Amino acid sequence: MIAASRAGISRRGLSFRRAVVCPGQSRPTYRFPDRASGRTASVSIAARFLAAFFLLLASVPAVAEGVFYPEIPSLTSDNPVFQQYCDDVSQARQALATAKPGVDLPLHLYSYVPKKTDTLITIAARCSIPYDAIASLNRFASMQDSITGKTVILPTLPGLYLPDKAVNTFENLLLSSFDPDDPTIISFFVRDPDKRAVHCIPDAGFEGTVRSFFLTPTFRFPLPDGALTSTFGMRKNPVTGHLIFHKGIDLAAPRGTPVHACADGTVTFVGEDSVYGNYVIIAHEGNKESLYGHLQTVKIELHQKVKSGSIIGTVGSTGQSTGPHLHFEIHENGVAKNPEGFIKGKVRQ
């Protein structure tokens, strides 16, 4: 199990047991409101479609890319499947607002194929579901991922949807922010080609470095993969125990992992000291600089021009360090800035 606890997640102080998670059942069920009595009953997908048929409500399952969930043909108020989805979202939000420990939360999945005019933001706004939920469930690595023509799974419960194992840098950052002992998780399986397990943290969302990594900053991530272990700002020095201002972010990665230039630039410093160990500084356009500390090896030379993505060294634990990681800083006009505002959330291919 995975649960929220540290930086990277925003959530309410709620505690949950389990949810009515239909996708995890052998014959998935969905809540289908009885319009006459106002009651809600559970029916199978087949029964849902049959009822929709007799009500002249066209509901076609999505089978693209192995997904099989009620498909929403269009995100318009006159579409009955979208109306049903909106009803389920409303019920889920009401359940969240009144949730008590041990009370089940409703979670249902639908599918939708975005049109050329759709974006993640517009879909999220139309569905009244945070884009964090849609992005994490569909394993989007950044806001720049193309969604047109792809089958997108839409959850009815706001929250973060996390995999068992990260497949990209963004997911690795996201997973590094969780405490596996937190009991507030909803776990189920998504019926996609990988039949992957998903863990939902209700009412949670991207925050801090995780959010900025996903959005549209200007610099690329300096590692092929790495877990965020320390953020920008005041913190207790892990070596000395003193409270100091941390001018960058720390990204844990195996010793020897390639370190990449975050943008085009010119190497203005190659050296070492007792704090940063072996480190490199690169000057970029717009009076910006990037710093890479605790390197095991350095693979560029002073005054060398580098391209975004060029390998400049490898991850190490030199200087004031408790284990292999990259200390990464961004400076603008000589002032240290939070790297989360600059890092581009695109995974290295």
Image (spheres, rainbow, N blue to C red):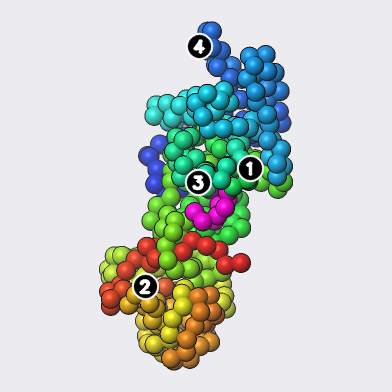
The reply, left or right, for residue 316 in relation to residue 72 is: left
Can see residue 19? no
**Do residues under tags 1 and 2 come within 8 Å of each other at their CB atoms?**
no
Callout 4 secondary element: loop
**Residue drawn at (43%, 86%), measured in percent from left and top?**
267
Can see residue 196? yes
Of labels 4 and 2, earlier in sequence is: 4
Give residue 130's position: percent from left, percent from top: 45, 41
Residues 5 and 135: in front is 135
Amino acid under disc 4:
Gly
Mark nearer the viewer, 1 or 2: 1
Label drawn at residue 119: 3
Callout 3 secondary element: loop
Where residue 218 sits, quadrant-wise, is bottom left
* Boundaries of the magenta span: 136-147
**Do residues under tags 2 and 3 come within 8 Å of each other at their CB atoms?**
no
Mark nearer the viewer, 3 or 4: 3
**Residue drawn at (50%, 26%), measured in percent from left and top?**
77
Label 4 environment density (alpha carbons within 10 Å; few <14, some 14–19, many ≥20): few
Callout 1 secondary element: loop
**Label 3 – label 1 distance at C-alpha:** 13 Å
For mark 4, what is the residue?
Answer: 38
Most common secondary structure along the magenta stretch = loop
Label drawn at residue 73: none
Q: Is residue 270 above or below residue 9?
A: below
Give residue 97's position: percent from left, percent from top: 39, 29
**Do residues under tags 3 and 4 come within 8 Å of each other at their CB atoms?**
no
For mark 2, what is the residue?
Answer: 330
Label drawn at residue 151: 1
